[in-house]
Structure formats: C-alpha cells, structure tokens
Image (tube, helix red, strand yellow):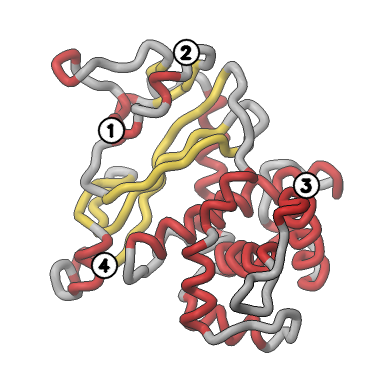
Amino acid sequence: MLQEEDIIWHLLSAITSILGKKDRRHPLGKLYLSEVLLCGILFALKGGSFRRFHPWLKKRHLLNLPERSRLCRLLIKYRKLCNQFLSSETFFNVIDSFGVEIIHPAREKRSEQSQRVSRKGKSNHRWIIGRKINIAINGELEIVDYQDDTANVCDNNFDEYYEEQNDHIYLTDKDYRKQVKYGGTPTNFKICNSGSWNERMWIERLFSLWTRICNMKHSFHRSVKGFQAKVAYLVALTNITFRLNESLGFSKCSLVQWAL
C-alpha cells in the first residue's frame, strides 16, 4: 500500500510530465493547471461529495486552495485537459457501459436538481435514476474514449464515434446491437455471446474498482457539467495509475494501493 503523501506526489509528477510547457499558473488564481488537475483526480479517487472533499484536502495544507465553489468551477472549466491522458486504440478493444445512480428510485421526481441531470433507465438488469458512462479500453487495459448520457439512453446510441474507426475491432455485448432500420450494427463491432471472449471481463474489473475504491456507483451532481468533469478526472486517474503500476511493481489493473 502507498502512503497518502506518496500517492499525491506520484499523481502530481505524472500530471506535470504530461502537461509539459502547458502547465502554467491560472491568471486569476494561485494554482497551476497541474494542481487544478490534481484536485480533480484526488476528488475522483476519494469519491463522495465535493462538499466533504474540499475540507479533507484543505486539512492537508498541500495547496493554496481557493474557496470551495471557485475550485469547483475551475475543475469544470479545465476538465478537457484530461483528454491528454487518453490512450490510443489497439487492434482489439472492449466497450461497455457503467451506470451511475444520482438519486434513489424511491425519490424519483422529488428533486428538481436531479431531474435536470438524470433519467430513469436500466443498468446491470436493475432500474436506476442517473446517468450512463460508455467506456472503451484497449488491449493494454487503458481507456481510449468515454462518453456519457442519461440512463434511459440505449447502449447502441454510443456507436457514432466507433463507426469511423475501421482499423480497429470493438468487443461488445448484445446491448450494442442495432436493427437495420436504425442504421445497423457497425461492421467493426464484434457482438460477443455470454461466456465467449473472456477478455471483455477486464472492463468489468475496471468497473468493480470504480465501485469499490472510488465509490462511483452512487454520485450526486447538481449539473451535467459537474458530472462530466468528475468522469473526465476519473478517466485520467485510471490511465495514470495503470501506467504507474507497471513502474512501481504492482498489478496493472489495480487501484487498491491508491485508495485514500
């Protein structure tokens, strides 16, 4: 297990090495862009609400943090920088969706804030009120693309990006099958039956880590941009830690030693 100080140091070093010369101090604040990304990645790793995360990080006295709402706006503004941590496709890739519950189904339509962010849909054969994340990983178990939408959207609506990637094959389940009258299933999609192509279980292991380590299965958000920001930092966290695991001697597909 890594100590808390080592976790923060390894993450910050990886962020600064990726940003390079783009790392600069925010003109209206005291944080560098690498420090803003570090706050977002630690929030994704810690899990829970941002209202509890901000005091936890402030007690560490590591960064000159701004007020909570201002830091939240900074994380939303610079979430697109996380795309620099995405990996590239390999010949075989795996696609699957991950459902995030925003509010309990028993409290449906009781909160106006949750209605702006979430919808009712099925995830893992159960009803949820939330959003859905579509993830694609390559043969090196790193994330190459991610999308999000409300939980009522079918998985086969996430195939617009992958239809143009004719040089790659994507292993999917039956939920990504699309009828001919709606455009048909993309030719580079390999629909795998249950029990075949066990390589698809690597993405299920990733989702299990997100649930147990990052507490991502339940995550309340007041806005869509806030949810998208947390997903972006979660993706960056996954790729950074998986790459560092190899150099530190850990199993690559593991987040246990990074738990806060």
Q: Which residue is mark 1?
A: 157
| Left or right relative to 44: residue 49 | left
Query: In the rendered view of the protein, which quadrant contains the N terminus?
Result: bottom right
Q: Which residue is mark 4?
A: 104
Element class at badge 1: helix
Q: Amino acid at mark 2?
A: Asn
Calculate the distance from the C-alpha at mark 1 to the C-alpha at mark 2: 18 Å
Mark 4 or 1: in front is 1
Q: Nearer the viewer, residue 24 or 162?
A: 24
| Left or right relative to 109: residue 81 | right
Q: Amino acid at mark 1?
A: Asn
Q: Which residue is mark 3?
A: 245
Of label 3 and label 1, which has the lower sequence position? Answer: 1
Q: Which residue is mark 2?
A: 166
Residue 97 spot, x, y in % from top left: 39, 40
Mark 3 or 2: in front is 2
